[in-house]
Amino acid sequence: MQARLLVDLAAIVGESHVISEKALLDPYCMDWTRRFHGPALCVVRPANTEEVSAIARVCTAAGVPMLPQGGNTGLVGGSVPGGRDTSGDQPRELPVIVSTRRITWVDPVDELSAQVSAGAGTTLGDVQRHARAAGLEYGVDLASRDSATIGGTVATNAGGIRVLAYGMTRLQVTGIEAVLPDGSVISHMSGLAKDNTGFDFAQLLCGSEGALAIITAVRLRLHRPHGRTSVALIGCADYEDALTVIGSAAQSRLVAAEVIDATGMRLVQDVSGLPYPLEQRHPLFALIEVADGGSGDGFVADVLETRDVVVALDASGIERLWQYRERQAEGFDAWGIVHKLDVSVPLETLAACARELQTVIAEFPKVKEFGIFGHLADGNIHVEILGPPAEEIDVDTAVLECIARYGGSISAEHGIGRMKVDHLDLSRTAEEILAMRAIKKAWDPQGLMNPGVLLPVSGEK
Ligand SMILES: Cc1cc2nc3c(=O)[nH]c(=O)nc-3n(C[C@H](O)[C@H](O)[C@H](O)COP(=O)(O)OP(=O)(O)OC[C@H]3O[C@@H](n4cnc5c(N)ncnc54)[C@H](O)[C@@H]3O)c2cc1C
């Protein structure tokens, strides 16, 4: 049956776009964190929506699961196969990974509506550059911009460093095209500002993590750029202090407000060779970007007078200061397999929660190093832990339970994936999970779309 499916897939996309040889298949089966991996039947690389639709038809006819994959930069194991696929009542067939990386078209920017349509496999970086060439800006930015795809960012409802200014990915999406497991294509790409004609599939697919459909195209909202900005990296005593700094910048046109701790600063210096940026040592650093023209233009001048701070006013200086924040993941990753926990808490509890997290994590003897960085103004912190083996989840569970106690979310922006699937009930009620299951059942009655991701394969949890 598998041999027959491989022949059918090759007939759709051409033999060279069906990859089943182990050495070529392996990179698609291992995620960026190296914590998640599993076997697949093959990778299939369609060039357009028609080919995706034909792939879905033959996989569904064969009862074989499909795993949509973009840039494979996801951090929760959702973009690769996993062992959980065999945990249901019936052992499952190995999945076919449907890679969108050949679906890379971008339409000319519609300057009147400030929107653009793009194929799902177009990288975020390419969309950003395309928008910039038309004098506009795409509102999502992540350090993985040159690998992450537009389809992947929609499927994960990616956040990143511009959420404060523009919101999460779901606020940028005005239209969508997707292929359902039975091969039918739903397309609603008009991007109309006013369109109350029923359920909004674009919004449903934002954050669906490949568990409902394969996104093939997206229509995106663009923005007028902020103009000139400046960046300040400021030494802080603790989280309360860092939040005070953000509060004092709030009168300005705040574009980004990030936080880095001393561990992350040291690890980034180790991998990058960047010098320590400030005069004194601090436990915490706030990185603030403000645009010219707000009512609080004095912010940079104020922090310069009162704080240990370095300010960048030109493009190359701004890029250099951002490296201390953007290279955090790389800094931790250089030391081995990282337990990456992306969580959010209400701002008023963030400082207390961060303190408790430090105590909770330090209790695990296998933890060698841990740090916290993130998008401070969004209440979104990334907890990075080194030491425990990849498959051990005790420390992950302790962190997520602590977040739940503070009324937070166990996934701020990376999604649930395979990593947090057994912890979903810490953030969503039983009724909400049942409602999600009902939607999944309606769209994917055979349970073939990315099984084991977002919702557990079996059981009622
Ligand atoms: C260095 C680094 C920095 C990062 N920074 C951030 C950050 O600041 N904020 C943030 O939110 N994330 C961040 N990420 C995580 C990651 O880049 C995002 O989750 C991104 O949106 C994933 O896009 P992708 O194309 O790589 O998707 P993949 O990793 O390929 O897939 C991710 C999920 O989306 C599904 N999927 C992918 N494409 C489709 C499709 N066409 N249709 C349906 N489902 C699909 C997959 O099945 C999987 O469940 C970072 C990652 C790295 C490595």
Image (cartoon, rainbow, N blue to C red):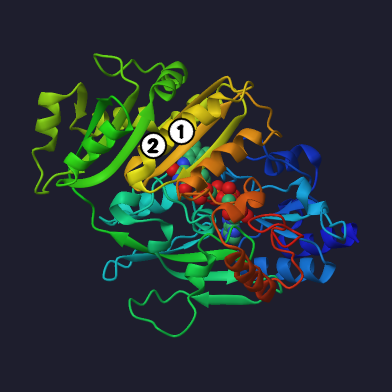
Mark 2 surroundings: few (<14), some (14-19) or many (≥20) residues within 10 A = few
Quadrant location, the C terminus: bottom right
Tell whether circle 1 marks a residue whose Cβ is less than 8 angstroms from ligand 1.
no
Instruction: Name above or below for residue 243 compared with residue 106.
Output: above
Name the residue at 11% across, 48% down. Answer: 293
- Decide: marks 2, 1 in contact (CB < 8 A)? yes
Label 1 element class? helix
Q: Residue 263: tell me if it is visible.
A: yes
Judged left or right of residue 299, residue 20 is right
Q: Position of residue 178 (x, y in %)?
A: 58, 69
Tell whether circle 2 marks a residue whose Cβ is less than 8 angstroms from ligand 1.
no
Name the residue at 72% across, 58% down. Answer: 451
Instruction: Name above or below for residue 22 compared with residue 432.
Output: above
Q: Residue 101: tell me if it is visible.
A: no
Q: Position of residue 189 (x, y in %)?
A: 45, 74
Q: Position of residue 98 (x, y in %)?
A: 68, 57
Label 2 element class? helix
Marking on residue 356: 1
Judged left or right of residue 253, residue 325 is right
Judged left or right of residue 96, residue 102 is left
Instruction: Name above or below for residue 371 compared with residue 18.
Output: above
Marking on residue 352: 2
Name the residue at 54% across, 24% down. Answer: 362
Judged left or right of residue 103, residue 273 is left
Q: Looking at numbered disc 2 in the image, what kind of residue is underneath it?
A: Ala
Q: Looking at numbered disc 1 in the image, what kind of residue is underneath it?
A: Glu
Marking on residue 187: none
Residues 102 and 247: in front is 247
Mark 1 surroundings: few (<14), some (14-19) or many (≥20) residues within 10 A = some
The Cα atoms of the two marked residues, 2 and 1, are separated by: 6 Å
Q: Quadrant of residue 442?
A: bottom right
Q: Position of residue 215 (x, y in %)?
A: 57, 64
